[in-house]
Image (cartoon, helix red, strand yellow):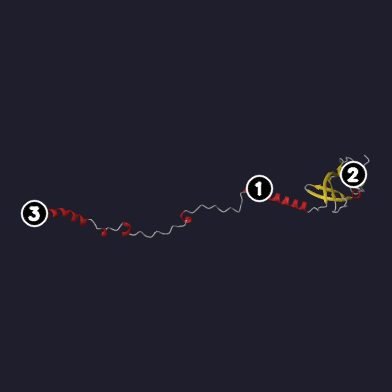
Amino acid sequence: MNRQLLLSTGLALALALGPVASLAQTTPSPDKAETPAAEAAPAMAAEPAAPADQIAPQATQAPASDTAPAGQAEATGKTAEAGSSATDIASVVEGLTPMVQDVQIVGPWTNGDRQGVWRTVIAQPSGENAKSHFFVQQIETKGTDYTVLSTTEITEISKVDGAILGYRADEPSDVDPNSLMLFFEIVPTGAELSETYELRFHPGQPYDFGPSTN
């Protein structure tokens, strides 16, 4: 009976272990586990990332054209021309001697088919006791051209014992439009009130300067 019990027990164990053994044969052991796909077929080494400018080239501005648009070129040309003219004028003004203290256009003149303007200039040298020198210029105008026909100093002005407050021109003469009359307000040294002097000027003739008769 004991023998039969042992055989029955052994058979039961064989039946119980059979599926486990079969499972053990079909289940890979940890040491023989399948290599992951990445290990079984290693991926090729990734290439270095390309620089950003190669990955997506950035849009660059087209180089500025050497030729400006017609309208802009025209405006630039006008500006350059105006600037050049302004530079020339500035050079003339900068070239004036510091002795020139006053310049005025005091009136027009006509002589037949010729015409122009009268210009006066006051210049004073440096120095404590320096006197003012007064000049009359006759300038002819032809379109945009200007020509200085004559420059005359009124020498009596530098000899006046006093200060010139100002001067003005009389209206052009209908009888002699090629002449000039100026009135000066001069304050004698030590005086409080000014005195009026007049200058009668005609080209090519001696001028007349003295106290006003009006």
Q: Quadrant of residue 6?
A: bottom left
Closest to the observer: 31 or 212? 31
Q: Which residue is mark 1?
A: 75
The amino acid pointed to by label 2 is Val
User: For the N terminus, which image quadrant?
Assistant: bottom left
Q: Residues within 10 Å of mark 1 (few under 14, many from 20)?
A: few
User: Residue 58's x, y, as percent?
Assistant: 50, 53
Nearer the N terminus, badge 2 or badge 3?
Answer: 3
Q: Which residue is mark 3?
A: 5
The amino acid pointed to by label 1 is Ala
Nearer the N terminus, badge 1 or badge 2?
Answer: 1
Q: Are marks 3 and 1 in contact (CB under 8 Å)?
A: no
Q: Which residue is mark 2?
A: 187
Inspect this view and state whether residue 5 appears.
yes
Closest to the observer: 107 or 173? 107
User: Residue 92's x, y, as percent?
Assistant: 77, 52
Q: Are marks 1 and 2 in contact (CB under 8 Å)?
A: no
